[in-house]
Image: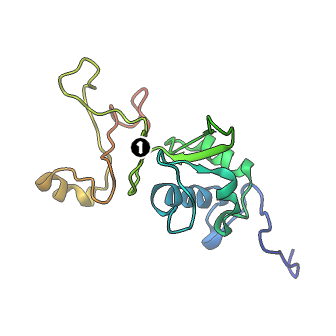
Amino acid sequence: MEGQKRGRGGRRGRGGRHRGGEDRDVHLSKSLSFVLRHGAAQMGLDMSSDGFLLVDDLLSHPQFRSFTLEDVERVVARNDKQRFKLCANPETGRLQIRANQGHSVQVADLELKEVQLDTPDCPREAVHGSYLQHWPFIRSQGLRRMKRTHIHLAAGLPGDEGVISGQ
């Protein structure tokens, strides 16, 4: 392949490497996380009030032109933390995508469940994952949402039945 030129938007295919040797799917997942949680407006993409972007619009953006619908579908399906929701828009039928959590922008109807202590469906334990380096602050100040719109908790520890790490 040496000496051959690859045009703009050339597809590297599944398993290829991206900048810095990062796996192509990992790069797409990180890029999706950023745009869907924080950066749609600054990238000129129109996000609906419930946090969805049209997949066609996303894939037309210069940052995503080298990816295909199949790439997006694969990354969404294989994401072990279920970070994204991909579905047809109920009004237009066009495919849309959103992040399930972690937004710094206000998003309506994220299908989140508020933890209520005095209800029968309250989990026995609610766990928030973070880095150990943050523990002294959390211990003294409590959990804070910082620039995000919510604090996400899991109903158990990673590895417990039904628990998705990162949710």
Q: Residue at x 67, y 43 (%)?
A: 95
Compared to residue 113, the image places residue 76 above or below, namely below
Q: Residue furthest left?
A: 140
Going by the image, does 51 lie left or right of 124? right
Where is residue 118 shown, x and y percent of the image?
17, 23
| Between 103 and 13, the one nearer to me in the picture | 103
Where is residue 126 shown, x and y percent of the image?
27, 35
Q: Which residue is mark 1?
A: 108
Q: Residue at x 68, y 44 (%)?
A: 73
Q: Amino acid at mark 1?
A: Ala
Q: Residue at x 22, y 21 (%)?
A: 119
Q: Quadrant of residue 138?
A: bottom left
Compared to residue 137, the image places residue 156 above or below, namely above
Instruction: Give the secondary structure at mark 1.
Output: loop
Going by the image, does 153 lie left or right of 30? left
Q: Which part of the image, by quadrant, shows the C terminus?
A: top left
Q: Residue furthest bottom?
A: 3
Where is residue 146 shown, x and y percent of the image?
27, 58
Q: Which color scheme does this rendered protein use?
A: rainbow
Q: Quadrant of residue 94?
A: top right
